[in-house]
Amino acid sequence: MTAGDFEHQNEARWAEYERLVGLMEKGKRSPEAEQLPRLFREVSLDLSLAESRMYGTRITERLNALVIRGYELIYRTRRGSWENVISFVSVRFPQAVRKEWRLFWLCNAVFWLPFFAMMLSAHHDIRWVQAVLGADGMASMEQMYGGKEEQLSHLRSEYGSNFMMFCFYIYNNVAIDFRIFAGGMAAGLGTLFFLLFNGLSIGASAGYVNHACNPASFWSFVAGHSSFELLGMVVSGMAGMRLGLAILQPGRLPRVRALVEASKQAMPLIYGAALMTTMAAVIEGFWSAQGIPYEWKYTVGIIGWIGHIAYFSLAGRRHAHAA
């Protein structure tokens, strides 16, 4: 095929692509906009063919300019679209959690069973809790949750401002979630270990507060952000276990390829966990530590847990049925 034949054969498609790009560059909406990605791929292929067959600079420069305009338009639209964010939060994230329902219940069991076992053991034998917390941990819990005034004064002296509390909590929460997620690279054992460890340590803290401190001070503080923080750990564990299973059971794929595919499946989970962790830090820094009546804090906490149960159970189902 000569350069002239190549240009004549594809001229109509190039003109349609250029017209559509021009409309979208001017901010005009077109019902044909959904065709742009397909046309972009076709023009990119034409450019590759023109270069490999050496059809001349006139054709290649024209096609190169069209490809650049289309790429910038598609990239700018995807990067700046809030619709993608809304779609992720309302549809793709809860769907991803439900899709991995087996991992969801596994990670919940690994975290919550030791949590409740350790918390309830304080009523029967406090030595288990003491062994987990150690002397420094028990002293810290007494200083923090000895009473409402002790809690507020400790927080003010420790962090100085709500913003600094937010910074500390998001650093701490992200570090925990990252360890849980990254532990999946050890064939999932690291993820299971960190979930178990956090369940034991948090349960021991709750049990010791109920035994030796002011329980209302503790539960009112953690109520508001607990659903975001603890479920965020569980979702991070799901993402880590997805990586671990790819290493243990790659199927017919090479392990590296299986790990890459598992990473793609885990991305919605880790993005969602990061969002939940950020929300937990916001609530923890700007709400939980304030001198607000306990009843209000408990109410917000209950709403948070009910909201998360409804969200993960129902959000995105209508879109799934439509698909």
Image: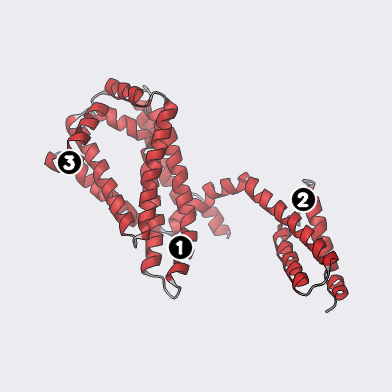
Left or right: residue 49 compared with residue 7: left
Regarding mark 2 in the picture, which secondary structure is present there?
Answer: helix
Identify the amino acid type marked 1: Ala
Regarding mark 1 in the picture, which secondary structure is present there?
Answer: helix
Q: CA distance from mark 2 to mark 3?
A: 63 Å
Left or right: residue 93 compared with residue 53: left
Residue at numbered disc 1? 262
Residue 286 visible in the snapshot: no
Q: Earlier in the sequence, mark 1 or mark 2?
A: 2
Identify the amino acid type marked 2: Met
Looking at the image, which residue sits at the far bottom?
1
Q: Which mark is residue 149?
A: none
Relative depth, front residue between 44 and 124: 44
Q: Position of residue 218 (x, y in %)?
A: 28, 31
Q: CA distance from mark 1 to mark 2?
A: 36 Å
**Where 76 sits versus 62, above or below?**
above
Q: On the rendered image, what quadrant is the C terminus found in?
A: bottom right
Q: Earlier in the sequence, mark 1 or mark 3?
A: 3
Q: Which mark is residue 129?
A: 3
Q: Position of residue 58 (x, y in %)?
A: 85, 65
Relative depth, front residue between 180 and 124: 180
**Where 172 sits versus 31, above or below?**
above
Identify the amino acid type marked 3: Val
- CB atoms at circles 2 and 3 under 8 Å apart? no
- CB atoms at circles 1 and 3 under 8 Å apart? no
Q: On the rendered image, what quadrant is the N terminus found in?
A: bottom right
Q: Which mark is residue 24?
A: 2
Q: Position of residue 22 (x, y in %)?
A: 81, 52
Q: Position of residue 46 (x, y in %)?
A: 76, 69
Number of marks present in the image shown: 3
